[in-house]
Amino acid sequence: MSLADSLTPAKTSTAASILAAARALLDEEGLAAVAMRPVAERVGITPMAIYRHYADRASLLNAVADAGFEELSALVLSLHLNGDVEHRLMQVGEVFLETALRFPNLYELMFLVPREGARVYPRDFRAGHSPTFNPTVQLLEESMSAGELRTDDPVEIAFELSALSHGLIVLYLGGRVAQSEEEFRSLYQRCFRRYFHGLRL
């Protein structure tokens, strides 16, 4: 299942149609374009009708972001992880990179826009409330137990890896990396390899 397919809700209800329209506007025109009136026009309903399903614009954007996290989590969990710890962690990292490159506006909404109820470090991550973060923690725990990595705080290291990934991606999406997409992918992989080598025993 591709991310494009998985992030397109089936039009089985008005709420789902609204969510799909909001997502389409986000992908095509960016975050500022997602407002109640243009979403309603796409669905073919009055702007007031949206409020029966979403209390306000913030609620609608939260729903789009939540759907993105659900599908991203499903993609991470569907990975057939193999190889050493470095390769397994890179497989997870590639899912995040692919999401950002294919859907930059969704990535911005999910990870960069302040949202009510968004998960925060360390509280939510240590409590295991992030389904997109938990697999990395589990991989680190397993690798430490197996002696592949030196013993350390797996949650903190997973957060560091996330910061490295998001930092590189944000710089690229913001036009601060003068490389082609292919060149940037190679840079992303090299940066992670350097980090991993510092974690090994």
Image (cartoon, helix red, strand yellow):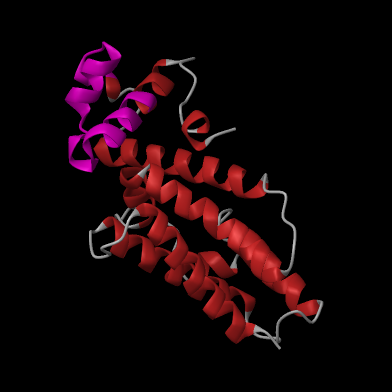
The residue lying furthest to the top in this view is 44
State which region is magenta: 20-49
Q: Quadrant of the N terminus?
A: top right
Residue drawn 69% across and 66% down?
139
> Residue 72 at what x, y percent from top left?
53, 45
Q: Is residue 199 above or below residue 15?
A: below
Q: Is residue 123 in the magenta section?
A: no
Left or right: 104 as drawn, with respect to 174: right
> Residue 200 at what x, y percent from top left?
67, 84
Query: Is residue 188 or residue 33 the one in the foreground?
Result: 188
Q: Is residue 122 visible?
A: no
Q: Is residue 176 above or below residue 46?
A: below
Q: Is residue 21 in the magenta section?
A: yes
Left or right: 157 as drawn, with respect to 144: left
Residue drawn 33% across and 55% down?
180
Q: Is residue 123 above or below residue 11?
A: below
Residue drawn 46% across and 16% down?
11
Q: Is residue 139 visible?
A: yes
Tell me which secondary structure the magenta stretch mostly adopts. helix
Q: Is residue 4 above or below residue 43?
A: below
Residue drawn 26% across and 11% down?
44
Determine which quarter of the picture holds residue 130.
Answer: bottom right
Tally the marks: 0
> Residue 190 at what x, y percent from top left?
50, 71
